[in-house]
Each structure stands twice: as structure tokens, then as C-alpha cells.
Amino acid sequence: MEREKHISPSKEEAAAAEWLPLQQHPIFSSCSSSTPSSDCRLPFNLLAWDGASRLYLWDPNTRRLHRLSLRFPDLDPASIEASSVSKMLCPDIQIHFTIYNISVNRTGSSLLLSGPDGLCVMYLYGQTSIKDNAIICRTISVGSQVYFDSSNSMRTLQASWHPYSDTHLGILSSDSVFRLFDLSTDLERPEQEYYLQPVEPVRCCNAVSVCPVAFSFGGEHLWDRFSVFVVFSDGSIYVLCPIVPFGSFYSWTSIEEIYKDAHTFGQKSSNLQAVTSSSFAIAWLEATFPDFGNHEMEGGNLLALKARPYVPFDASLALQGPLRKVCRHENIEDSEVWNAECEGRAVSFLYNSISQDSVLLTAWSSGQLRIDALADELQPVWNVGSSPRLRVDSGHIVGVAMICESITQEFVKPDQEMHISNMVDTMWLGHPPPLLRLAVVDLALPANAANGTLISIFADPLVPERIYCLHGSGIDLIVLHFLPFSNQTTGKDEPVKAPSVYPILTTCHSDMCSPSSLNGFVALADSFGHSWIVGVTSQECIVMDMKDWNMTLPLHVDGDMKSMDYTDPSEIGTPDIISKELLIGPKVVLTPQASSALRSLAADSIEGRSTLHHYFKLFHENYVEYGHKVYIELKHHGAYLKRILTNQHERLREANQKLLNVEEKQRSLDDRIHHAVQMYGFLEERLQRFRSLPGANQKPLSRAEREFKSQLDRFTGVDLDALHSSIEALNARLGRYVQSSQGNAMNSARQMPGRRNNHVQDVQISQLKSAISKLSLVNSENSKKVNLVESTLRRQEVND
């Protein structure tokens, strides 16, 4: 029980420990780290989390590892507390290279220390001694003869733990070789080697297209769990399938699902090629997992299957790809045109399994992020006739190496194009799975940050739709609102919403700032549904609660779902207040059946003690640790339930108070409604009276009629008065002239008539007659105009 002694602190330490907010822990101010050179192509992250309660920070100055114990308070989920008593772990060997990245395996027992000049693995619970209050841990070097030999210039591009094994480490190097090391058997020779040859030599026009950049293991979706995705610097994505670590464990249900899928879509296909490929896959499954072929175990207590070292002797893996875009006119140049949408070169890659979708994210040096999804299921493909190279010990396979070439591109013609959902006719034909372009996100990085800093991509451990991008200017959050298979619509044509980008942390406020201000990043989550992000700079620690970012997630509501008023309470699910990991139970330990070899072992012999120690170790790793996790979670479970009940009672009290307020205001509301009904009736009566008035049904005046009305109004105000005054003046002048004419005629009659005077009178009389006739014409015209104006005014008054 020595390991248990290291896991649980002593009573004196527990009593002396104080809990304080994580961002205020003094270790971050004392552990200052320098910024690495920008020419290194490895990701830079000196922070790691074991997925439970321990946070690790590497100090490059002292070359030691700090371990902090965390706890997530139930009453204040917005904060994370760390124990003031921290552990300092020191490797038992001298590390001469610079550490750029640290990562913990899935059980939290081993830590990977990677850099451009070396790879080391530190066993966190393999204590050898204690020196200067530091725990000396067993540390081993991995692949020193392969990668870090002075005779070659080969460098490592990426190193990652395998998600289905605690001892297997995947390494991609600059010689275009992917190697899988088993740390429990051999530290220098890899267990599996895959030499990547992505394109044919005649089509290799650019040397950059054959340089790998990064890789990512697949997730929990059919054949994706046996796949390794590799991205090259031109953005092309390739996949190796199947790759399984020797001795790794997989669930029975996952293997059964793949097995049934191969029988349903492969063996029943009308295409001979599909039948051949599915038969090869079925044979590989039965040989790799021999316990699965034993039908007597089906339905029993066996929940996990152990992968047996197996490689087909007459076939090697094919490098599928490059994964191509779904379009009608597909050719070999389409991938180049498609990748031309992003500038620069690909720098990092991430596979993210979200419900039923397999999402691939590729980051480019220009600050762009390409998001794609697999439009079809991934299937294994072999090159029959290309024998792999095996390393055998006592009749057992201990190593394998093979050359992986890209398969022949057989693109779909326009007249043969089929819908994506019709997978029965397109599966098991050996075609590379096409990609659906979801979005191209531009992070809008500064010029110096985009050209000199790598972009690291992380998935949220709680909500896979949230993606974190770590770069020289800070951290950006990308939320995926649409997924082709997970977000099934109701058949309506709904617009596809593009991903949202939120800059949640900025460490660079100008173009002249340092491009590597953030030295570590990790995303945390507890079993109660709360998540945080933790960032470490050279002087401080930043903790951000992601509860407020839950509103950015898409909300999918089924329009055909019945109302909640008629929903059976038994159909409403309870919230997940206990982690699914604990509900599943401890990991099953596969023990061989009782045999004569075990029965013949003596308890006091070396073999007996070794076997007993082995089973005791398995029991401790699978059951004792599980019991410890159950104890920790149940210990905090009561406070969590109490907080939930308190919140529910508070909401119930507020609802009752609102109901009382409504009842008090019910009478006034009834009076107001009655008054509103009466007012409505009164207004309705007035409207009926208005409708009975003359001219109510007449149409509104047109534009020409409105112009004529304005002229009439002008005549009424100005011209009509002028006409009346002119007529009156002319009438007065006419009266005076008639009177003067009659007086002159009488005077001339008394005088002697003469020829000269008569001639003058005749001329004047003729002129007067002509003037009178003209005046009468003007008077008649003015009278007509006056009558017209008066009649129009009368009609207008009637209409108004």
C-alpha cells in the first residue's frame, strides 16, 4: 500500500493545509517561466490536469514539477480552491533539454515531458526517495536512440498519449513516420511504425505537401477509435485505420457495434468490393479480439475486451486520403483549390467527437481555423500483397513496421453522385470519406502573432461544442451551432448558423507585444456540470468560470413535442448529479481462467509472489482508486443536493409570493377588463355613426385633384377678391362714363350742328361701344370663373 500512502496526505499535512483561491496561490508568482524561442514548432504548454483533483505545473527555472490539490466548492461554483500545501516532484535523472509541453495520461499516473531535444516520462507515484522536501520520481527517456541521436537531424513534431492505453505513446517525427511506443515493454524500439507516403511521386509537385505537421487519435465512434488522423502542411488530412495498441482495452458494446455494422452494410452489399473489404474487417476483429468470437461469453459479465497483437501477413494499412470535399465535379486538384481558402500552412490539428459527428479542426499559420466534419463513416482499407515487417519473440508479435501508401482516388462522377444518407451503397468501397465544410474562422490575429506563434486547439471537457484556441494574443472561444448529423432538424428549411467566436482572454493589446505571454492553459470540469479555464502567465494565474458562456450554446426544440402541461412526470429525466464515470463502475480486470499453470504455482515462490503482486496491483488500480473517487464524490454530494433543494425552495417561495400578488390584484384587473370592454363598445358605436355620415365612402383625392384643390384655395384667398374688386371698379367707371356721355349729348344738341362735331361724336361712340363690348366679355368670363369657384367650394364643403 505504498502508493496509497503517496496518494492520501498524512493527518498532520491535512490539518496544516489551508484552502485558498487557485489564482491567489503563491506558487504562480514564485514560478516564473521564460518565453521560448519562436522558431520552435512544438506547442508550448507547461500546465496539465489529471482529470480528477490534481494540477501540475512545470517550473523551467528549477526544473521541477509542482503538484496542487484542487477542490471545487459546492456553495460557490464560480471559484476553485487549491491546497496551500503543494508537492514538489523532481525527476531522478538530469533533464538537459528544454520542456515545451507536459501532458498526463488518462489515469493520471504518468506525465509526459516533451521538448525539441528530448522526451521523458515521469511516473508520478513511483517515488524513489525524498530530498530537500521534494519527491524524487522515477523518470525514463523515450526514443533517445531513434530521435535524439547525434548522427541524425530528425526531430519530433508531436507526442501524445493514446486514449485507450496508459502505457502507449504516439510520436510523429519529421521523417514522415508515425511510431507507437509501449513504455511497459521497450523504451527505445517502437511497438508499431508507419512510414507515411501520402502522394505518388509523379504528382508530388511541391515538397511541402509531403511534410506532416500534427496528428490526433480518433474518438468513440465506430472505426474512429482505431484511427489516427494526420494533417500535412498543405492542409491535406489523411487517416490510418485500423491501429490498435497491443494489450489495450475496449468495451464489448463498441466492438459489437462495429461487428454488426460490417455484417449489415458490408456482407449484404451487392458490390463485390464491399463484401471483400468487410470480410477483411470482420476477420481482423475476430483475430484482434479473440474473446469476442467466443459466443458463450456473450451476455455474461465480460464488459471489456483486450486487444491481441495481430497483423495480417499479406496486407498492410493504406493511407486513406486526402479527405476530400463533397462536390459534383471532383478531381485531384480540388483539394488544392479547397485548401487555398486558408493562407499560410497548417500548424495544428484536433479531432473532436461530438455526439454523432466527427469534427476535424485545422489551424493555419495565418490565424485561420478550418472546421470540417466527416460526411461518411470511416472504414479500414488494406493494401493486399504488401507484406508488413514483423518483430517476433517466442512466436508472439512484439513489433510491426509497414509502408502506408495513399489509396487510388476514385471520385464520384456527376451522374453517379448519391446522397450522403444513402450509406448502404457507398460504404466499404475503399473511397476516402468526404468532408463537409462547416466554416472557416478568421481569428484576426496581429501580424507578428499570426506569423510567429503556433495555434493550439483544445476541446472543452464538458461541452464538446466549445473549442478553445490558444495563440500569442490570448484565448478565443469558438462555439459550434450546427452539426450535420447531431442537430437533426424537423424537416423545415432552417438557416445554418455559422460558428460564434468570442475572445475570452487577451494577453496582447498592441502589435508590439510579446507573442507568447501565456505559458500554460488547461480546461477543468467537475462532476456537477461546472467548467473553468485556467491560464498561467509568467507572473500570475487566471481562472475564468464558463457558466456564463452556456447561453451561447444552441437550443434545439422539437415543434411536434407535446405541451409540458400534459407530460407525464415519470417521463421527465432527472438531472445528472452523479458523474457517469462512477455510474458505469470500476474498470473490469480481465483475469485468465483458472488453469493448471496457476494452480501449480507455490505461494512462496518468486513466480507466485510476482503473480500475486500483479493481481494486487490491478485490484488497487481499478477498485481501490474507484472507491476513493466514490468516497470523495459522495462526501460532496450531500452539500450539492442541499444547495439544489435550497434553490428549489427559494424558487417555490418566489412563485407563491407572485401568486399571492396576482390574487390581490385580481379584483382591480377584473374592473379594468370590464371598463375596457365598455370602452370598446362605445368606440364601436361611434365608428358606426361615423360610417353613416355623407361622404364616408368616398375615395381619397388623387394627386391631380389635390393640386386643383390647392389652386382653388389660392383663388379663394387672393384671385377671387381681386376679381370682385375689379368688377366693382369697372362698374363704377362704366356708370360715370354713361352719365358723362348723356350730358355731353344734351349739350351738343343745343348747339348748332356741324360736320366736324358730329364726326368726333361718332368716333367716340364707336370706341365706347367696342370698350363696352370688351368689358362685357371680360365680365362674363369673370362671372363664369366666379360661379365655377363657388360651385367647387360648395362641393368641397359638402365632402368635408
Image (tube, helix red, strand yellow):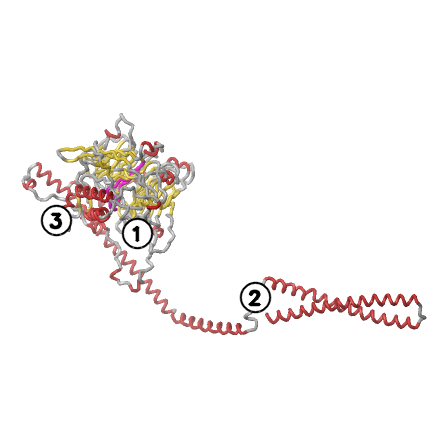
The disc, 3 or 1, on the residue closer to the chain's N-terminal end is 1
Q: Quadrant of the C terminus?
A: bottom right
Residue farthest toward the top in the current orientation of the protein: 151
What amino acid is labelled 3 in the image? Glu
Location of residue 618 by image quarter = top left
Q: Is residue 301 left or right of residue 108?
A: left
Q: Find residue 214 and report its horizontal and vertical position in percent.
A: 30, 37
Q: Are marks 2 and 3 in contact (CB under 8 Å)?
A: no
Q: Which residue is mark 1?
A: 76
The disc, 2 or 1, on the residue closer to the chain's N-terminal end is 1
Q: CA distance from mark 2 to mark 3?
A: 91 Å
Q: Is residue 22 left or right of residue 631?
A: right
Q: Which mark is residue 296?
A: 3
Instruction: Residue at 49% x, 72% y: name it.
Output: 683
SS at mark 3? helix
SS at mark 2? loop
Q: Is residue 647 left or right of residue 588?
A: right
Q: Which residue is mark 2?
A: 700
Can see residue 751? yes
- Asked if residue 788 lies in the magenta stretch, the reply is no
**Residues shaded magenta:** 213-230
Q: Which mark is residue 582?
A: none
The disc, 2 or 3, on the residue closer to the chain's N-terminal end is 3
Q: Find residue 410 and report its horizontal and vertical position in percent.
A: 31, 40
SS at mark 1? loop
Q: Find residue 349 and report its horizontal and vertical position in percent.
A: 32, 40
